[in-house]
Amino acid sequence: MAVYKDNRPTKDGKIWFFKTQYEDFDGTKKPKKSGRFATKKEAEQAELEFKISLHEKVNHNEITFEEMIELFLNFKKKRVRETTYYNYGNKIPYLKPLFKVKLKDFNYSHFERWHDYMDYETTLATRTKNDIYKFLKSILNYATAWYEFSFVKVYPKMTNFNNPNELPPEQLCFTYDEFKQFIEVEEDIKWQATFRILYYCGLRKGELRGLQWKDIDLERKTLSVRKQITDRCGTVKKFKFVVPKTQNSIRTLKMPEILVNSLKKAKLEAKQLNGFNENYFVAGDAFPISSNALADRKNTNCERAGVKQIRLHDFRHSCASLLINKGANIQVVAKYLGHTKIEETLKTYSHLFISTLDEIINVIDTLEDNKTDD
């Protein structure tokens, strides 16, 4: 098979195609020439899909990992969340050492070489490596269920990644004083409200980007998270709403007075925009704000305020830190952040229970002081 470029484009400018010969069921060789495609990548993708379709009709035993991944993606496309499907694409490049291996030949030696590649030729965190390992097993399970491959000799020997010497990733947060320092250099009313939402409500970046004025009730002082926007769209003008990360991520939050007042000012300003309505975005306008714009503004403000650079997601950690260190109940924190299980909150933020631990130590110290006095 090969991809070619035609010097005579179609009316809509498509110039790429592929052509090949293949054997029909009766062994007859037949030519195949595709239609036109706008890009070389599209033609190569169509070529791969055609090749896979031949395997489906003729011999599953010749399917390679690369082809099985494509089958897996086609199967999952309408069965998983858009964000999940998008994340598959981020994991696929790390399976490249297995691409040319035929599924029927896959054995522990192949797995061990891939495992070594992940350990010694990537700089990924152990948690990320295990996410990719889980993705690999999903593909193998799919191949077993739908194409009757068997990996019973390999599975018992396969192990996840483990690095006992790996330091836990540092979780950066703004203290309340640092956030005040950060927000004081921001003069734009809309941006003030945007960063206060991130800090006081702990929204994920996609949740913030999907927040519209109809989700804000200034009278009841509530903010509702019902949807989010992913970065997959490429341009804000082609945005698409998707459901939040989990069912528990759909939530309504009470807002502190400082945020309510900030949003009131921001809405008054937003109403001056041509065509404003309740579907306008709180952090944008008729279209959601881009991730790059958020990051750039955050970086600039950190530099101007003389505070440490944190990620946008670290505003969420900062919110958790603020709540926990002010004595908020762990169940309330979990619900506020939209976590499915309290264990998730404890696992992620157990190191933040500083003030609570201080209170316990103070109680013990008081007991000892009283004992000494006696």
Image (cartoon, rainbow, N blue to C red):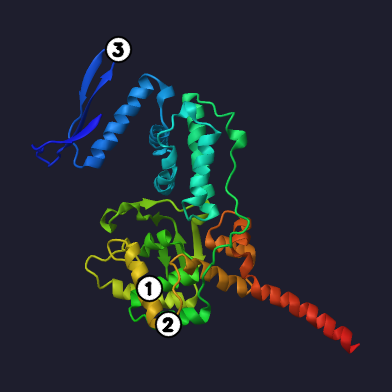
Residue matched to label 1: 299
Is residue 264 visible in the rendered image? The answer is no
The Cα atoms of the two marked residues, 1 and 3, are separated by 63 Å
The Cα atoms of the two marked residues, 1 and 2, are separated by 11 Å
Query: Mark 1 vs mark 2: which is more N-terminal?
Result: 1
Residue 48 versus residue 260 in the image, above or below: above
Q: Quadrant of residue 327?
A: bottom right
Q: Name the residue at the top extreme.
A: 26
* Left or right: 19, with 267 as reference point: left
Picture disc at residue 306: 2
Q: Residue 186 placed where, x, y %?
A: 36, 80
The image quadrant where one finds the N terminus is top left
> In the image, what residue occupies the spot 59% across and 28% down?
152
Is residue 15 visible in the rendered image? The answer is yes
Query: Mark 2 vs mark 3: which is more N-terminal?
Result: 3
Residue matched to label 3: 27
- Disc 2 crowd, CA 10 A, few/some/many (<14, 14-19, 20+): few
Name which residue type carries label 3. Gly
Query: Mark 1 vs mark 3: which is more N-terminal?
Result: 3
Q: Residue 162 placed where, x, y %?
A: 60, 51
Picture disc at residue 62: none
> In the image, what residue occupies the spot 52% across and 56% down?
125
The Cα atoms of the two marked residues, 2 and 3, are separated by 73 Å
